[in-house]
Amino acid sequence: MEEEHQTWKFRDGEGGRGRGHRRGRPGNRGAGRNPRHQSLSGRNTNNNRLYRMGSEQTLDPNHPTLFDRFTPNVGGHRVGPPPQRPNTNTNNDNQHRRQNNSSRPNDRTNDQGFRSRKPQTMGFLMLQNLAKSDSKEIISQINDKKEAFMHLLQSPIERTDIFALILELLAKICQSSFDQIKLTILLDVCNSPFISSLRNYMMDLPYVERKSANNMYWKSPNEFWENFLKFCDCLTTLSPSTAFTKCRSLIEGTSKVCLETLAERHSYQLPDNCNLILIKLREAMTEHEKEKTVIASQRKNPRLEDEAQEPPENFRELSVIPRRGDLIDERAYLRANVVKGGYRDVEHYLDVQFRLFREDCFGPLREGIRQFIHDPTKRKYDHIRVFRNVKFVEPYVSSQKVGSLVEFDASTKKRFKKMNWAHNKRFIFGSLVLFTKDNCKTLIVATILDRDLKYLDKGMIPVSMVDAENGDDLYKNETYTMIESEVYFEPYYHVLKAMQDPAFPRHIAMQKYIVEVNPEPQHPAYVNEERSYIVETELNLNAKFKVLDFNTWPSSDELNFNDSQYEAYKMALTHEFAVIQGPPGTGKTYLGVKIAKTLIQNLKATGNLLLLVCYTNHALDQFLEAILPITDSIVRIGSQSRNEAMEKINLNNIRKCEQRTQSSSRRLFFEKRQDLKESILKLKRAQEQIESLNTSVLSYKYIKNFVPESIILGEFYKGDKGNFQDPLSCWLFETVVYDFNEPIHLEDAENEIPKFASVDDTNDGRNYVSLDDLELENIGGTNINFETSFSMNKAQTQMKYLMSCYRNPKNRDEEYNVYREIIVLRSLMRMFKEMRRYYNEGVEVSNQANMHNPTTVMPVDRWMMYFKWTNYVANDLREKLPPLQDSLKTVSAVYEESRMIMDYELLKNTQVIGMTTSGAARLRKLIMALGAPIVIVEEAAEVLEQHIVTSLTKKCQHLILIGDHQQLRPSASYMKLAKHYNIEVSLFERMIVNDMHSRRLAVQHRMRPQISALIAPAIYSDLQNHPSVHDFPNVRGITNNVFFMSHNYKEEVVDDSASKTNEQEGDLVLGLANYLMQQDYKPEDITILAAYSGQMFYMRKQRSKYVWLSKVKITVVDNYQGEESKIILLSLVRNNDDNKIGFLGTENRICVALSRAKEGFYMFGNIDILKNNSPLWTKIAATLEGFGSLGTGIRLMCENHNNQISIISSPLDYSKVPEGGCLLKCNYNLPCLHACPLMCHGYDRAHNETKCQLKCERVLCELNHVCPLKCMEECGPCKIKVLKTLPCGHQMSVYCHLEPNDPKVLCLTVVAAKLPSCGHEVKKSCYMAVEKVSCPVPCEYRVDKCGHVCTRKCHVNDDADHERYLCQKPCAKTKKGCTTVLEGEAGDHQCVKKCHEECDDCNVEVEKKRSACKHRERVACSKSPDEKPCRKKCARVLPCGHFCKKLCFEPCGTDCKQMMKKKIPGCEHEVSLECGLEPAHVYCRKKCERALPCGHPCLARCGELCDAGTCKQLLTMQFQSPCGHRVQLPCSVYAAAKGTGIKEELLLQYCAEPCGAELACSHACAGSCARCRQGRLHEPCAQPCHQINICGHQCAEPCNQVCPPCRKPCEVKCGHSKCRRDCGAPCVPCQEQCSRKCPHGDCKRRCGEPCVRAECVRPCARALRCGHPCRGLCGERCPDVCKQCRPDDFPTDFLGDEYDDDALFILLEDCGHVMEFENMENLMKGDSELIAIRSCPYCRKPIINTPRYKDIVNHMLKTEINPIKERVYGNLERIIERRRELQEVVAKFHTTHNRIYTDTGFSHWKTAFEQMLLVVKSKKKCSLLQLDMYFIYLNILELLADVHKKYRELGLVQLQDSLVEQNKMICRVLLKNVHKISQQQQEDIGKELKRMNTILILSKILNHPSYRANESSPAVKVAANTAKAVILKWGIYEHEKSREALNELQKAIKVSGVISEQEKQLIIRAIGAKAGSWYKCPNGHVYSIGQCGGAMEVGRCVECKAQIGGSNHRLLSTNQHAGDFDNSRYAAYSEEANNMANFDF
């Protein structure tokens, strides 16, 4: 294989040495064979290879170039090429390559000007010095002397000591961490004669008699064998096949014989450790042989997640690239991360960690792909993004990058154009993508190669193939589906590869703690009892102490530490493994810097001392910047820093500074870089060759080598070939026809040139092999090294050149010749494109095509044959691609390691190295070489454990982990691993859980106490505040320093993402940030945090709308760990109807979010949904409420006017603070004494930056001219123009400050002059010389050639006779065939050609004027414009001056409706009025600006009169109301009542205290004391009804509306169809054949009828998918439950007990739950007291559609449910009948009650009735319930009418006002509640009606003669006043007290029987008691019992105090039914009560 790699390094016939010993062989694989036959037989096997990376092959450099210029000869004129700049880089390309091949590396100059030294031999001394070199530098040293070293290996070795030296050298090479370069050297050694020489040397070694001749061996034989075994072991590890092939005899035979003989002759015994290694090597050889000879049977991998079971395979055998089996066929074997306790050993640890990390990458991708396979048509899938119809369009080759260019479909391209890629993390370098064209049956795996925006904007992306399971050619125009993984693959790849390294277990540091979890502490190895440190104390004094003697340590105060920091500091310096937990703000970074400073200043080790690893770039920069003052020996690795201080210590910058330094490592690097460039160049050339076959015609000379049948063309087309120099081109193009009359349109020139895709070779600075690399200069344009006779690319270039010549010809001859060249070239390009299109469409060669005479072949057949021939060439080229790709992969790896070796040289003496965890994974080999003894990991709690362990080396003696696991934990991509496998438990947290020696910092210095209270003690129980945080200033412009604004804005899901956004919340946050910036805060003082990236991107996008936010940081919470800001604005986003908060319930993320702010913290979200989902948020909310920092609006306070408070509850509210202040004017006096013109502003309060915008008033000159500039601008010289006399005598206006003789003043006065050349009189400016004046007079002579006037100016001295003049004027004639007769200019009829050209036909429309108006129309010449009416706008002017607005053919009117602005006289407000209206005060609609006499502002419109009697401003004073509340009165009310005194009724009317009473519907009343009339008539309930309907659904109507029939879709369905009616309507039974059927019988009836056969009760005979028997019933759907496969999911009873093994189950198709059969039968067939559909016991969903119970359900619907629905809601006939009754009642209602209808005093009754009249007249559909409600409405009106009628009939006058007021109050309630009068309102109205009846009785008593006779009696007065007070009071009416008061009044006047029989009926109707509810006490007094009318308790009669009532619906025996009172025959609660005879109709 090694020889094959070198096959193509030499040309045909060339041999010679390449590198080392390898030799080449002939390179033309096509020679000596039949290419035609070879292609036909071989192309299918080689045509479908993928372009994978890597190989060292190249194509034959002798192939001629493809870009031979096509030069047709047309008419004897040779087409010339466009002028080109000479390309000096490619003149001697072949020669340069030949030199490189033959002389490298002896005579090779690299990129930096370094030249390798001349070849030299390696003597003993040189070899000895080389063997003594440091193992870390040995690679570069060997490379410097590579040729000499290889020469030594190739030559016979005469001095035996050389063998020991070479083995010593090889052993040091094996210690290098750079595997690829190490392997290259070892392979060169194995392929050299050295191995056989070593074998002979070892065989002779025991027999040497003179040991002095082999001194180096006998001086240290153990060292010899150790070196030998290191070499063999390393080779076996890196390349087992090479070790088996080349060194097996050494390991198994030679060494064995040698050692046995040495033991026998010299008594030498191999040390035990060496012997053990040798035994393992021999076993490895044997095992490798077995693998080669025996095919192991495929074992099925068990996937039991059992800790005790061994893994099914070695984790090192697993692919780190996802394969189809990993994603579809297999379930990964996983074991959980061991959180508590240790691992068994290192292998156990690595196996668990590797598999978890690999599954974290593959698991989400697997889930997404399985979803895609299940439904490929979905738009979104979890964890992946799917792009359909993508194509591989062409290879992609650029600097260091080789892959393919993928093109998306049109819809995706359109979507990409709208994307802001700068704010998007899609398609970043290294992202994983998969391609499939067969629904994932095969997969092509690739990674994103470049994220070039110019490709993304075009809908393309370069990818690199890393693996593929099929070998199809990608570029067949086939469409693929591309699947993008949302998990970023790049860091996973490097960590997984590192963990798979067989040598990795030896490099894991701190195994005692990490693997074994042994908490016993030890001090670092470099610390002993005498080790002392010197540290700087607080007073800048140096304190020296012994590290291990705490008694000598300085105190915590001296070190400026608090107690917790002091303890952590001590532990970190004295423990080799230290864990420091730092809660927010406790100074963990500060402490880490102190620790690093102490170590750096006291440990003066040579080489690298400390490796700093951080999770984020920000933390790394922050830490390194803090230690920069300590030492300048720092290097930062990684180019993602934004900190300027890091630039000088960045590795890239250091490399540039060291560019000119010569060293072996740099020479190695530049050599390998040149190798990489050449490999890329070779592959790029090869791929361009293949691509050019589609756009070129190969030369005859080239194609005949592949297609023998084409040779005949040379015989037929030799000699004169016309326009062509090549026989093949002549044959293909000879049938082209050139149309030299074809026009050339210059504007279409660009369209002549088709766009062919080109390979981009730009480098975006990102490198796929390294973290940060030296810039590789772009690879220049390459010549395709085979010949072409025609190229479309060159033809395009030629066409551009010809077009430019045609635009600007030098003369007519050139124009003519270029025109012909264009026609020829265009025809050839057209021919090629057309034929290529035919071939792509599948056109075949016809059977008539015969190459015996190629001139007879049809043109299409010629081209089809040619394109088939190019396939043979393409197949040959494709065969050479895979070796080139393999070579490139190897060269890339070698180059990367050479870069690391060079970096090692730069870094080896650097004290501190800093990098991120991602960088550490990539550069692990460099880290191993550096071997820092101290490693500090900052943010360790955020890093997955796998990242940390791969950053450690065996040389690590001291590991310090700093972090806080209670803040952000590592983020797993696969949540299953986080939930079940503990992958999110970091190494940091695992150590703390296992009580590893750790310390927690306890004092925070960041947050003010109100902020820290949010996390302590809720998260941190013992976190203390430093005294300094109590002194933080308050946030300017806001009343609260901490606030949570709770809102109800709903979240949205971001398109093409799983993230969330809440736009209105985002606007609130941005508005507040903008306001805070206006308070003179700096951008770095404010940070906006978003809980979701979607919200972050939204706010970043919207920030441009806010002036102050351009530099304010907006980021997500997870990216802000470890950072802080003065003010934090937190957007929590979540608010949804599902009541979910996602990771906002995670304590770690909450902790980070709440602990970033120092002085101000403002949160935005929905506190209710957070509290419902998280106990922690409940605690936080309680803390916020305690501070008064929780609400729905933020209070902003103007800093200039502290009394101006603005409450922000929506984004629109920020308009109250437009400039960060308030809405008042600023009025601050500026230095110029003008007032500040701005509105009150929070920024620049000192007005240092505010500039005066008023006009300047300063005088500039003696003429008193005033400065015209603004006040803020500096006054200049006076620039007012004044008239001055110039030296020439003319007067001219010049600037005031200029003198007339100033050189700047030029006289512009126009004077006459005569030109000497032509004699024309001209006008010129006075200052101009005559000689410089050009004659402006047009040439007056006619052109003789055409008769046109010359267009030039007077040119008597230049072509005066127009001999060279070319007339460019248009043709003077009209177009051909034009019928329009016009004189002069013919308009559009004029010929548009030039004068000498033939005229075109006239086919244009003309514009003609209409006869009836002045409008013009475009019509054809023969058409009249008057045929159609003119529909243009009328252009006539009305008398008012406005234009007429009608159409032209319509008559103009006199009414002008034009709206115009007019000012109202008096108020001067501007209003819009029609033109014809005069402005008057009544038209003013603006707000009145006048103040009322009371001093309050007038709230009316300006056009209305100001009336102080309407002032509604509430007074500040309060009055005691009779209801017990304090009342504020409106100004006008108080003013009106002030004179007469404020009445109680007035106070009651304006009482605003909330009612809050519980209504009959159980809801709380939302009215106020006044609006509910002190509880007399409550406001209607506005709460949702939520009453459960008979169907089981909740009523969604408001509580104050009648519950309509259920409008939800009916859920009844069967196997044939579903009911489409509303739920409230009865269902139509299904008439299809019943589908009940099983092997034991079937039903013959219709589906909607009862079945003739019962349900089958036998077990189901089918098997489940798993193969186990079904546990369902025969004929029913099988329940998906299996006790054997899924025991955890198997159903249990309600107590959790298992069912019997023979139990059967039913699947409820309504909800999907599985029920046990017997329980289900009892549920469905058992008796129930409720009339309702049976429902699922688990979810309460009605059981309607389970087929087994359809008969039961249908019967229930038919006999129970539907009749109740009909009874409640009514059927159509009943509703129609009831509506007719209502209409009849309404029709005669006002006639029946005409007295009250016409009584003006009771007009409200009339209004209420007319409202009902309108309702009845409407045709709106309504239910029976609604109609009954309308009857209740009319009944109330009838009761009011009856009271009115009785009052008038009795002729009463007393208490009329009270009755009118009662009527008015009740009618107003009716008007507001026409459609429903709730139960509560009915009760309230009933009480008020009783009050009215009582008022009527009281009025009757007061009108009684006895009362009038005794009116003056004190007893009567008291009784009357008492009765009035009880009956007329504002409170709730108390009927019993009213009756008692009336009885007392009757007793006082000594009368009885005042209440008549009619009045009794009125009372009965008012009370609303049902018939039979009236009873008599033992003394005959009447009372009623409410509700059902049955007695339930014993009470006292209000008149005689006798016992009344009863219990348990039984009346006391002393009481009796009062049937005579309401004409009822039986008591209400009696057996006879339901008898209709009980009611008297």
Image (tube, rainbow, N blue to C red):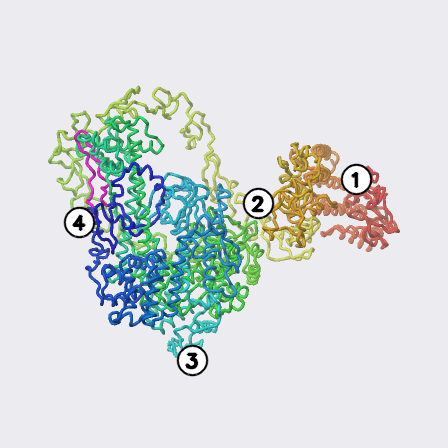
Residue on which the image places disc 4: 1301
Residues 896 and 711: in front is 711
Residue on which the image places disc 2: 1665
**Lateral position of residue 1294 relative to residue 1165, left or right:** left
Q: Secondary structure at mark 3?
A: helix
Q: Main secondary structure of the magenta part?
A: loop
Amino acid type at mark 1: Glu
In 3D space, how far apart are the residues under numbered discs 1 and 4 (Cα atoms)? 116 Å
Q: Quadrant of residue 119?
A: bottom left
**Lateral position of residue 32 relative to residue 993, left or right:** left
* Residue 356, horizontal then vertical, whole percent: 47, 57
Q: Earlier in the sequence, mark 4 or mark 2?
A: 4
* Residue 43, horizontal then vertical, whole percent: 33, 39
Within 10 Å of disc 2 (Cα), the crowding (few <14, some 14-19, many 20+) is: few
Q: Earlier in the sequence, mark 2 or mark 1?
A: 2
Q: Earlier in the sequence, mark 1 or mark 4?
A: 4
Label 4 vs label 2, nearer the camera: 2
How many marks on residues?
Answer: 4
Residues 140 and 1473: in front is 140
Residue on which the image places disc 3: 552
* Residue 828, horizontal then vertical, whole percent: 26, 32
Q: Answer whether labels 3 and 2 touch (C-beta < 8 Å).
A: no
Residue 695 sits above or below residue 653 on the image:
above
Q: Earlier in the sequence, mark 3 or mark 2?
A: 3
Q: Which residues are magenta?
A: 61-89
In 3D space, how far apart are the residues under numbered discs 3 and 1 (Cα atoms)? 114 Å
Residue on which the image places disc 1: 1849
Amino acid type at mark 3: Thr
Within 10 Å of disc 4 (Cα), the crowding (few <14, some 14-19, many 20+) is: few
